[in-house]
């Protein structure tokens, strides 16, 4: 399956700012069953864009606008090919738990087994773990499938309930939130029982017949758990899905703090407002890299963000 992606971000300032520096993680990864065919990043005002790859293998673009301005527009365009991931078995052998313990003893995937900025074993999380019976039983794959469904059933999807920097307790106590919250909660539960788990930032192609809870005009987030012999397997607790051909991966990290689509600072006595529009379109045939991405209409989601980050829906 081929997808064309358009991701527009606009920062508006209440007064002119003299300089702004921005870091962008919007370039889809090229690995496994996903292949990046084309990526282009443009800005207005014009900026010289530089690029590096972070310690997690994510593509990071950054730029500095060193002149007075009232807004910054960032446009990311990509073409990606996704092939169907290998079919998962119905279950794994119970001895996989021992294989996971051996990996831990060898220090493998340490960053994805330990607490991180948004991943904490709070009293509210421990209460949920007891309520859902999150403990080592059956096999890891069956448990992860069950937990994905349980989180989808236990939490209401409700945009604007939490903020980009909300700790997991806000969603846990309210029993509502967005994909960022549900992913953090699942990661925290999974790491407690010794399964390496990481946060995935990206996009989801929406179809009417799938009845997804996540919003169509926003970025998306889900989790990946590492299972011996299978590797990293994606689970989407927002929509009760195994990640497949509709999930487009952009960045992976310990939690959202590692992978915000934008992060920046600016000089000036002004407040900032963020507008975001995302559109993912399927392409029935191969698109040559020389072709221009189709023009699409984006919807805007407005939020006040002190640090120029955006919450994933």
Image (cartoon, rainbow, N blue to C red):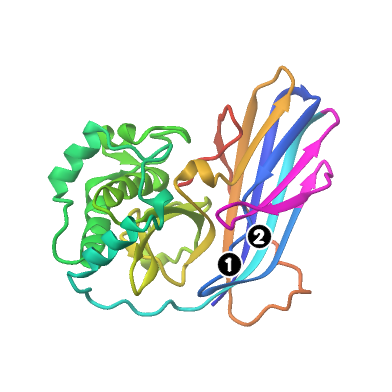
The front one of 309 and 2 is 309
Badge 1 marks a residue whose secondary structure is strand
Of residues 68 and 120, which is closer to you in this image? Answer: 120
Residue 52 on the magenta span? yes
Let me know if residue 164 is in the magenta part.
no
Residue 185, percent across and down? 32, 44
Q: Nearer the viewer, mark 2 or mark 1?
A: 1
In the image, farthest residue toward the front: 106
Where does label 2 land, which residue?
A: 296
**Residue 199 as seen in the image, left or right of residue 50:** left
Q: Are marks 2 and 1 in contact (CB under 8 Å)?
A: yes
Query: Which quadrant would residue 310 be assigned to in this image?
Result: top right
The residue sitting at the top extreme is 269
Q: Which residues are magenta?
A: 42-68
Q: Residue at x 19, y 66 (%)?
A: 139
Q: Give 75 or 112, whichever is nearer the viewer.
A: 112
Q: Quadrant of the N terminus?
A: bottom right
Q: Is residue 222 left or right of residue 73?
A: left
Q: Quadrant of residue 241?
A: bottom left
Q: Helix or strand or loop: what does disc 2 sit on?
A: loop
Point 84% across, 47% down: residue: 48
Neighbour tally class for label 1: few under 14, some 14-19, many 20 plus, Cα within 10 Å: some
Ranked by sequence position, the earlier of labels 2 and 1 is 1
Numbered tag placed on residue 281 in the rendering:
1
Residue plotted at (22% across, 73% down): 92
Looking at the image, is 98 positioned above or below residue 306? below
Residue 236 position by quadrant: bottom left
């Amino acid at each position: 399956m081929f997808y064309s992606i358009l991701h527009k971000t606009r920062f508006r300032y209440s007064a002119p700012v003299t300089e702004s520096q921005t870091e962008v993680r919007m370039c889809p990864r090229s690995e496994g069953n996903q292949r990046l065919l084309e990526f282009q990043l443009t800005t207005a005002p014009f900026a010289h864009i530089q690029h590096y790859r972070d310690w997690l293998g994510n593509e990071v673009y950054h730029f500095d606008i060193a002149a007075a301005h009232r807004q910054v527009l960032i446009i990311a365009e990509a073409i990606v090919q996704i092939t169907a991931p290998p079919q998962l078995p119905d279950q794994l052998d119970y001895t996989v738990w021992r294989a996971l313990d051996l990996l831990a003893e060898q220090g493998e995937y340490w960053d994805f087994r330990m607490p991180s900025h948004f991943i904490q074993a709070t009293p509210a999380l421990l209460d949920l773990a007891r309520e859902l019976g999150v403990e080592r039983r059956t096999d890891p794959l069956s448990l992860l499938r069950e937990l994905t469904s349980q989180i989808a059933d236990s939490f209401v999807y409700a945009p604007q309930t939490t903020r980009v920097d909300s700790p997991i307790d806000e969603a846990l106590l309210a029993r509502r939130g967005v994909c960022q919250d549900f992913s953090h909660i699942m990661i925290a539960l999974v790491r407690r029982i010794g399964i390496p788990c990481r946060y995935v930032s990206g996009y989801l192609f929406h179809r009417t017949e799938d009845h997804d809870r996540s919003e169509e005009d926003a970025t998306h987030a889900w989790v990946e758990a590492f299972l011996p012999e299978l590797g990293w397997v994606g689970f989407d607790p927002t929509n009760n899905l195994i990640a497949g051909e509709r999930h487009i991966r952009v960045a992976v990290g310990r939690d959202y703090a590692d992978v915000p689509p934008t992060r920046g600072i600016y000089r000036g006595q002004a407040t900032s407002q963020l507008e975001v529009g995302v559109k993912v379109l399927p392409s029935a045939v191969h698109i040559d890299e020389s072709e221009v991405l189709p023009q699409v209409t984006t919807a805007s989601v407005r939020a006040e963000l002190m640090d120029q980050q955006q919450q994933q829906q």
